[in-house]
């Protein structure tokens, strides 16, 4: 049971990290197009903050390596 739980945690962590990276990439593309006031950009910003908080919780409990990224 513990192995399955750890495996599920690892999958979730990888998914959160992948989603966060995708959001950051999309935001950068919109910045390049000077569309930071668009609804899409604002929605991405809200999602980025949500995922950033999730990743911060993982770091707080030493479940991931500390981020050196200052996003």
Image (cartoon, rainbow, N blue to C red):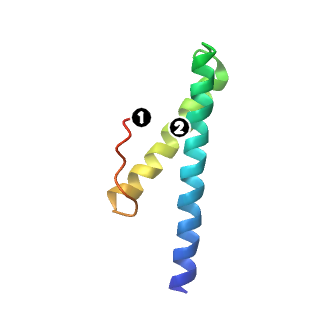
In the rendered image, residue 54, in percent from the top left (x then y), is placed at 47, 51
Q: Mark 1: which secondary structure?
A: loop
Residue found farthest to the bottom: 1
Q: CA distance from mark 1 to mark 2?
A: 9 Å
In the rendered image, residue 11, in percent from the top left (x then y), is placed at 59, 65
Picture residue at 60% right of the left edge, 56% below the top: 15
Tell me, for residue 34, which label it has, or none: none
- Earlier in the chain: of badge 1 and badge 2, it is 2
In the rendered image, residue 68, in percent from the top left (x then y), is placed at 34, 44
Q: Is residue 41 above or below residue 66?
A: above
Q: Is residue 37 left or right of residue 56?
A: right
Residue 22 lies in quadrant: top right
Picture residue at 33% right of the left edge, 56% below the top: 60
Number of numbered labels in the structure image = 2
Tell me, for residue 48, which label it has, or none: 2
Task: Assign the C terminus to one quadrant of the image.
Answer: top left
Residue 38 lies in quadrant: top right
- Is disc 1 in contact with disc 2, using a CB cutoff of under 8 Å? yes
- Residues 63 and 42: in front is 63
Q: Mark 2: which secondary structure?
A: helix
Task: Assign the N terminus to one quadrant of the image.
Answer: bottom right
Picture residue at 57% right of the left edge, 19% below the top: 31
Q: Is residue 55 above or below residue 48?
A: below
Circle 1 crowding by C-alpha within 10 Å: few under 14, some 14–19, many from 20: few
In front of the other: label 1 or label 2? 1
Picture residue at 36% right of the left edge, 56% below the top: 59
Circle 2 crowding by C-alpha within 10 Å: few under 14, some 14–19, many from 20: many
In the rendered image, residue 13, in percent from the top left (x then y), is placed at 53, 60
Q: Which residue is mark 1?
A: 71
Residue 20 lies in quadrant: top right
- Residues 34 and 1: in front is 34
Q: Is residue 19 above or below residue 33?
A: below
């Amino acid at each position: 049971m513990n192995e399955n739980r750890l495996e599920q945690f690892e999958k979730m962590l990888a998914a959160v990290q992948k989603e966060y990276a995708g959001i950051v990439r999309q935001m950068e593309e919109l910045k390049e197009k000077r569309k930071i006031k668009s609804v899409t950009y604002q929605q991405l910003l809200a999602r980025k903050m949500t995922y950033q908080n999730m990743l911060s919780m993982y770091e707080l409990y030493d479940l991931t390596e500390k981020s050196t990224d200052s996003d």
